[in-house]
Amino acid sequence: MNSAEIKIDLFRKLDSLKGKSLKEAYGILVNYINSNSNPNDWDGLSEEQIEGIKLGLSQLENGEGREHKNVISDLRKKYLNGFKKAH
C-alpha cells in the first residue's frame, strides 16, 4: 500500500466512527502525531507508573471512571474555595 492508499484507507476508517469512538481515535492519533516517542515504548516508565496506568485502565473498563469536568470541579471546590477564603 502506498502513502496515498494508506491515507484514504485511514480516512475511510475514521469517517465510519461516531461519537465516543471517534473522539477516542482522534485523541490517540493526535497524541501519536504529537509524541516524540513510540506510544508502545514503556522503557522510560517506572514499574510504579506502568502499574498506575494498568490500574486506571482496569478501573475504566469496570465503569469506575469519572468525567474530567467532574474531577476538575471537585478540585476547584476543594482548593480554590480555600484559597479565596485565605485572601
Image: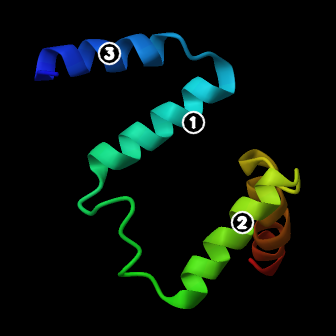
Residue 50 vertical position relative to residue 35 in the rendered view, above or below: below
Residue type indicated by callout 2? Gly
Side of 83 relative to 62 (left or right): left
Position in image of residue 24 (x %, y %): 57, 36
Position in image of residue 59 (x %, y %): 81, 62
Name the one closer to the observer, 2 or 31. 2
**In terms of sequence position, does the residue under pointer 3 or pointer 1 come before the other?**
3
Q: Tell me the element at label 3.
A: helix
**In terms of sequence position, does the residue under pointer 3 or pointer 2 come before the other?**
3
Mark 3 lies on residue: 9
Mark 2 lies on residue: 56
Side of 20 relative to 84 (left or right): left
**Gap between marks 3 and 1 measured at Cα:** 18 Å
Mark 1 lies on residue: 24
Residue 32 vertical position relative to residue 47 in the rendered view, above or below: above
Name the one closer to the observer, 87 or 57. 57
**In terms of sequence position, does the residue under pointer 2 or pointer 1 come before the other?**
1
